Amino acid sequence: MKRDPIKHVRDRAKKAYEKKPQCDICGTTEALELHHYAGLTELFNMWCRKNNIRINTDEDVLAVRDRFIEEHQKELYEDVTTLCKKHHMELHSLFGKAPIFTSAKAQAKWVEKKHGLVSKTV
């Protein structure tokens, strides 16, 4: 396999991503990134196991990615936040490079709390 399987999924899903015009924490409009609360790699791997799908080649991923995207609209497009690079890195420093699936609610609460703290100081 030439690429990380999730990169094929992201490439297809990116067309429909909607980043907000500012960071959900500090409001900056610079260096914005979309963060998925549910880690896509873990989500995709769980989905493959559940559906008894083996991914060995790039072609294997390409054959199933549209189905995966269709079945995970919420995680791909709704359970997201727009963060500046600084806050995105801070979130990952707390929750890990690839946060576990079950930490999605805690991540969302962290963003909400952090936004409240920043708002009070501005």
Image (cartoon, rainbow, N blue to C red):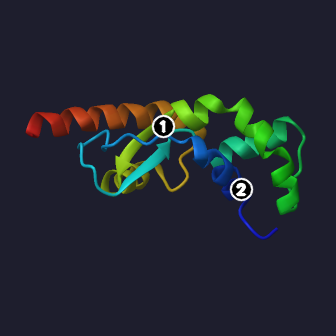
Image: 5 above or below 15: below
Q: Picture coordinates of residue 33 (x, y %)?
A: 42, 51
Q: In terms of image quadrants, where is residue 59?
A: bottom right
Q: Is residue 39 visible?
A: no
Mark 1–mark 2 distance (CA, rounded to whole Å): 19 Å
Taking the view exactly as shown, the residue that stands out farthest to the left is: 122
* Quarter containing the N terminus: bottom right
In front here: 31 or 43? Answer: 31
Tell whether label 2 touches label 1 (CB within 8 Å).
Answer: no
Q: Label 2 belongs to which residue?
A: 8
Q: Which comes sooner in the sequence, label 1 or label 2? A: 2
Question: What mark, if any, has residue 80 been given in the picture?
Answer: 1
Q: Is residue 36 visible?
A: yes
Q: Residue at x 71, y 56 (%)?
A: 8
Q: Picture coordinates of residue 77 (x, y %)?
A: 56, 35
Q: Amino acid at mark 1?
A: Val
Q: Picture coordinates of residue 67 (x, y %)?
A: 80, 37
Q: Secondary structure at mark 1?
A: strand
Q: Amino acid at mark 2?
A: His
Describe residue 33's horizontal placement relative to residue 47 as left or right: left
Q: Residues within 10 Å of mark 1 (few under 14, many from 20)?
A: some
Q: Picture coordinates of residue 49 (x, y %)?
A: 83, 41
Q: Secondary structure at mark 2?
A: helix
